[in-house]
Every structure is written in C-alpha cells, then in structure tokens.
Amino acid sequence: MNTVSVKSSLIFFISIGYLAPIQAAIKCWTNDTGIRECSFTVPLKYAGREIQIMNSQGQVIRTIPADKTPEEKKKAAELAKIEAEKKRIKDERRRQDIILLNTFTSVDDIVLSRDAKISAIESIIKISESNQTRQQKILDKYTQRAGNFERKSRKVPDSILKEIENSKNKIKAMDDFIENRKQEKLVIFQKYQHDINRFKELKSLRPR
C-alpha cells in the first residue's frame, strides 16, 4: 500500500482495520518534507525515524524513538561509561566497608594493626641503616686506599676503583630502599586513618 498523508488516510485505515491481519497496526512517521504519513508498513528510508503505533481508534499506543545520531550515540556511550564508573566506585566502597567491619571490632583494633605494621617497617629501616653504615665504612676504606696511591702519584688499581663504584651503588640503592620504606609508612598511616574515620562513620561514632 502506498503511503498517504495522515489527514487523508487515517479514517480510511481505521475503517478497513478489521480487514488487516490481526497483528497489523497503523504506523505513522514524518517524511522528508515534514508531512506526517501513515501505513501498515514503514518505508525502509524512514525506518530510522520516530514511529508512532496507533490502534484501530486512531490512538497512539506506542512510540518507537528515532535512531540516535553518531553524536548522540557517542554522548550516550560517554554517559554510560561515567555511570558505570560511579557504580563501580560505589560497589567497591561497599565491599571495603564490609571488609572493614568484618575485620575490626573497635577503633583500638585498627590502631593496634596500624602500629604493628609501622613498627615492622621501622625495624626494616633500622636494619637497612645499619647495613648502610657498614657499607659506608667499606667505601671509606677503599677511598682511603685510592688516596694513598694518588698521593704517591701512582695509578689506582682497577680492583680498588671497582670496589669504590660497587660501594657507592650499594649505598645509593640502600638510600632509595630506606626512602621507599619511609613513604610506605606514610601511606600506611594515611590508609589506617581513613579506615578509622570510616569505621567511626559506619558505627555512628563521633569523630575525634
């Protein structure tokens, strides 16, 4: 059936509606010139337009939205991504809250756990600093030997130069290791402080 304007065809479609297949319904859309058309089938070129489904009384019973433009699809995808990230953060926070409440029964428990971890790191730092001191003494020893050769205007043996270089590299590595452990202490303290505040919030306790 050819499409015709809605004004001239709606009554006709309604009047013959009983002759159409049981599943057939009147579909209306807007053509390229802005005129609303209706038929039992939608031309392929208008399949992406907004389609209104009408019953035999000429009432709109359902509206099929128009296909989104590439820009609209891109925006919708971006919004969906943002909402998904919000949900992920919310779910992760809920999971962390459950772990927090299942792990500790009081703020004191959290403090004890924090102090134990910080104490362990401080012990590692002390051991590293002691090793660093010993390595510095080794460096001083080889540096002194090298100085003795230089004062006598003699070439410093490669073995001594190698030991000096190795000692400097070890001391530098220890410096980096100690600094990383100090940063780790700070991160642990901040993380536990966050846990304490969140635990109080969850338990409806007044913040200190």
Image (cartoon, helix red, strand yellow):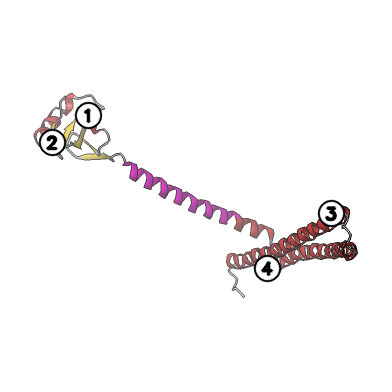
Mark 4 residue type: Val
Mark 3 residue type: Lys
Label 2: how many Cα within 10 Å (few below 14, some 14–19, many 20+): some
**Which circle's residue, 3 or 1, is located before the other in the chain?**
1
Residue 105 seen in this snapshot: no
**Which circle's residue, 3 or 2, is located before the other in the chain?**
2
Mark 2 residue type: Val
Who's the residue at 90% across and 62% down the image? 149
Does 103 sit left or right of 33 as displayed?
right
Q: In this view, does 7 lie above or below 174?
A: above
Measure the alpha-carbon separation of dots 3 and 2.
95 Å
Which of 33/25 is in front? 33
**Which circle's residue, 4 or 3, is located before the other in the chain?**
4
Which structural element holds mark 3? helix
The residue carrying mark 2 is 6
Residue 7 rendering spot, x and y as whole percentages? 10, 37
